[in-house]
Image (tube, rainbow, N blue to C red):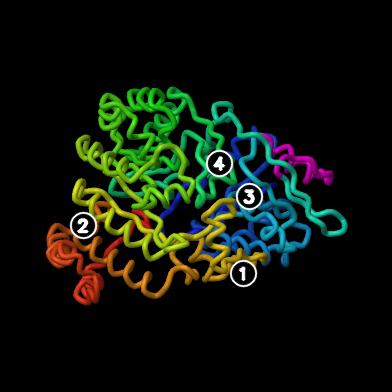
Amino acid sequence: MILLVNGKSHDSGKPILPMSLLAVAATFDGDLPYKIMDANHLDQPIQSLADTIIETGARILAVTVMPGPQTASSFELTVELKKQFPDLIVVWGGYFPTMYPRAAMSCPAVDYAIKGYVNGDLGAFLASLLEGTPDLAYPGLVWRDDAGDLTQNRMSKLVDINSLPPFPYDAVDMEFYIRPTFLGSRTISHHISLGCPFKCGFCGVVSMVNGKTSAEVPSLGAEGVARLVEDHGANAIEFHDNNFFLGEKRTQEFCRQIEHHKIRWWAYGRADTLLKYSDETWQAMADSGLHMIYIGAESGSDATLQKMNKGGKQSVNGVLQLAETMRRFGIVPEFSFIIGNPPDPIEDMNSTLEFIRKIKQINPGCEIILYSFSPVPQEGEMLESAQEAGFVFPKELQEWSSEHWQRICQRRDGELPWITPDIRKKLRNFRLVVDSTFPTNTDGNLTALQRGILRTAGRWRFATHFYAAPYELRLLNKLIPYQRPETAGF
């Protein structure tokens, strides 16, 4: 028996379908007994996992791990279960061991780590562990020799997603993962592509795929949507693809094929890619129910975009054009920005905040997401500037699990050396003014009256550029609890 485990990733109560574990389980093809267990769905994860190990005789604990809170929870349950079951074989996979393999293996309780996406053959490797003859040549495997020295195998090429079997939804409690959102009363997560062709200097996806992509053909993507709608009653879908809109022809055809389902959906995209789309494609996307696109605008400075190695042809003017295009078609842009980028974080912040004002003037209905710059192990000017400011990645898994590093991994500052108290204060005040003046449409709990009160209170500050000491807005924020998409999702 193999336990496929999703560590606790948040406290928001927002259940996210563990698609990585479903993808792995789909490749077992009935040859290996397994059980998917999600710590976000368990009141006492460690006890529940221990009970299951005893009941099933499970011999492998395979854990998917993202940087941030999931690292901390996975570390805790791994160490505790290894104490209780010393012969349990622990395998870590996902973004964290891909980006920080040595840190993952710094914990003696982690026996193996796997970097990158698995290519449909993970079952064969896990079977070799069960047989007592580990396949130490497995692509992406990180392992210790008898002397304790680490070996990191070369990652495999990105799999053709069209060759993979469909998710075994019967392996999880689908009703737990279907939830009400602003998109619809029965919203579920999905994806129909892997990877991204760009190598942005702040993005962890680069470590996973190194600029490679693989996308389902429109008919296969549409079949996946049909399963969710017809078999599970979904009326809204969040597509968590790294870069959904990889090709205009493919996007348009996919939209045509799902239009009859009358769903509403959300996805990630790039400004420069979307700006190339024809009005015909935009109309097809709108007709298919596309309601919102999360777009990394990143900065109000073209020079900073270049330092970020944003790639493609993205520019600040292009983002402004896209804001207008999306307004015309009634699709909401959710623009994210990375604030306080070295080497001159104050100038970077000021230029970006002014840029956000321009966007709001063009498209008042757009959503604004603000993050602090947090480095990733991606060579380039961004990481070099951070290291020059004294930034150092932890070497031990225990430090990665600290509250301080959880905040950094979530881009919530965490007291980074380039985010000064003045930057932190101005950013907090600006966010409060913008959130009050333009209350998010993703918070279904806000009434029309509450939105009106917030707008009235924040509008004069936004109009006059006066962000200092917004005491009245802080009081309102307590009286009218406000959901920020970057911290609570939607």
In contact (CB < 8 Å): disc 1 and disc 2: no
Q: Is residue 173 left or right of residue 391?
A: left
Of the two numbered discs 1 and 2 on the same chain, state the one appearing first in sequence.
1
Place of residue 423 in the rendered image (x, y in percent of width and height, measured from the top left): 37, 70
Of the two numbered discs 1 and 4 on the same chain, state the one appearing first in sequence.
4
Q: Is residue 421 left or right of residue 386?
A: left
For disc 3, the neighbor class at 10 Å (few under 14, some 14 to 19, many from 20) is many
Q: What residue is drawn where x is 64% and y is 39%?
A: 118
Residue nearest the viewer, comparing 28 with 427: 427
Place of residue 16 in the rendered image (x, y in percent of width and height, measured from the top left): 45, 50
Q: CA distance from mark 1 to mark 4?
A: 30 Å
Secondary structure at badge 2 equals loop
Secondary structure at badge 1 equals helix
Q: CA distance from mark 1 to mark 3?
A: 17 Å
Q: What residue is drawn where x is 14% and y is 57%?
A: 448
Q: Write down the residue under mark 1.
A: 399
Q: CA distance from mark 4 to mark 2?
A: 38 Å
Place of residue 162 in the rendered image (x, y in percent of width and height, measured from the top left): 54, 27
Q: Which mark is residue 12?
A: none
376, above or below 320, in the image: below
Q: Write down the residue under mark 3.
A: 98
Of the two numbered discs 1 and 3 on the same chain, state the one appearing first in sequence.
3
Q: Write down the residue under mark 4.
A: 22
Quadrant of residue 352 within the rendered picture: bottom left
Which segment is the magenta one?
Answer: 121-140
Place of residue 174 in the rendered image (x, y in percent of width and height, measured from the top left): 45, 44
Q: Write down the residue under mark 2.
A: 438
Residue nearest the viewer, comparing 342 with 288: 342
Of the two numbered discs 4 and 2 on the same chain, state the one appearing first in sequence.
4
Secondary structure at badge 3 equals helix
Q: What residue is drawn where x is 34% and y is 42%?
A: 293
Name the mark nearer the viewer: 3 or 4.
Answer: 3
